[in-house]
């Protein structure tokens, strides 16, 4: 196991509010292979190595807007298919931008995230 490091003024942890914690864990697990630390019926930490990079928090219905979380993919087309197969909806792209390609999707709770690749 590697020790998690923290850097001053760098995004360290992100929480995603979801309407149904079990459905969100199922979606992100199937689409991206995420694993979780369960902290009861309303919260699950998103594991990375020995630490966590974020969490899924059961809460109020999701609103539109706010920061856009971008995930990296080494195979964007495979990620598009994984999102669809897991029950997500691709809402934009894939499209090219200066630096690569990306797409946006919504999860079962309505959160919009993006995925990008260098190719």
Image: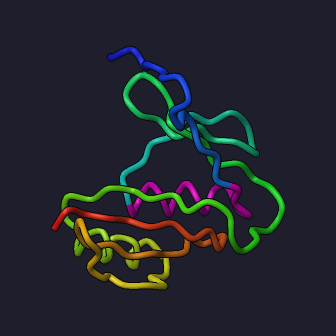
Viewer-proximal residue among 67 and 79 = 67
Magenta-drawn segment = 17-31
Q: Is residue 21 left or right of residue 113?
A: right
Q: Is residue 69 left or right of residue 44?
A: left
| Vertical placement of residue 38 versus 49, above or below | below
Name the colouring of the figure.
Answer: rainbow
Residue 88 in picture, x, y percent from top left: 49, 76
- Residue occupying image coordinates x 55% and y 54%: 25
Residue 56 in picture, x, y percent from top left: 63, 48
| Vertical placement of residue 115 versus 84, above or below | above
Quadrant holding the N terminus: top left
Is residue 28 covered in magenta?
yes
Residue 84 in picture, x, y percent from top left: 40, 79
| Vertical placement of residue 37 versus 105, above or below | above
Quick one: which residue is furthest to the right in this view?
A: 60
Q: Is residue 36 left or right of residue 95?
A: right
Residue 59 in picture, x, y percent from top left: 80, 56
Viewer-proximal residue among 31 and 40 = 31
Indicate the quadrant where residue 79 lies.
Answer: bottom left
- Residue occupying image coordinates x 55% and y 62%: 68
- Magenta stretch mostly in which secondary structure? helix
- Residue occupying image coordinates x 44% and y 84%: 92
Is residue 24 covered in magenta?
yes
């Amino acid at each position: 196991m590697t020790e998690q490091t923290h850097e001053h003024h760098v995004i360290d942890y992100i929480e995603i509010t979801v309407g149904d914690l079990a459905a969100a864990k199922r979606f992100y697990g199937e689409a991206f292979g995420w694993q979780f630390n369960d902290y009861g019926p309303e919260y699950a930490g998103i594991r990375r190595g020995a630490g966590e990079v974020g969490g899924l928090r059961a809460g109020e219905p999701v609103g539109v807007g706010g920061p856009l979380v971008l995930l990296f993919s080494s195979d964007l087309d495979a990620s598009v298919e994984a999102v669809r197969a897991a029950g997500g909806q691709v809402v934009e792209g894939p499209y090219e931008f200066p630096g690569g390609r990306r797409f946006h999707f919504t999860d079962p709770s309505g959160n919009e995230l993006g995925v990008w690749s260098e190719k």
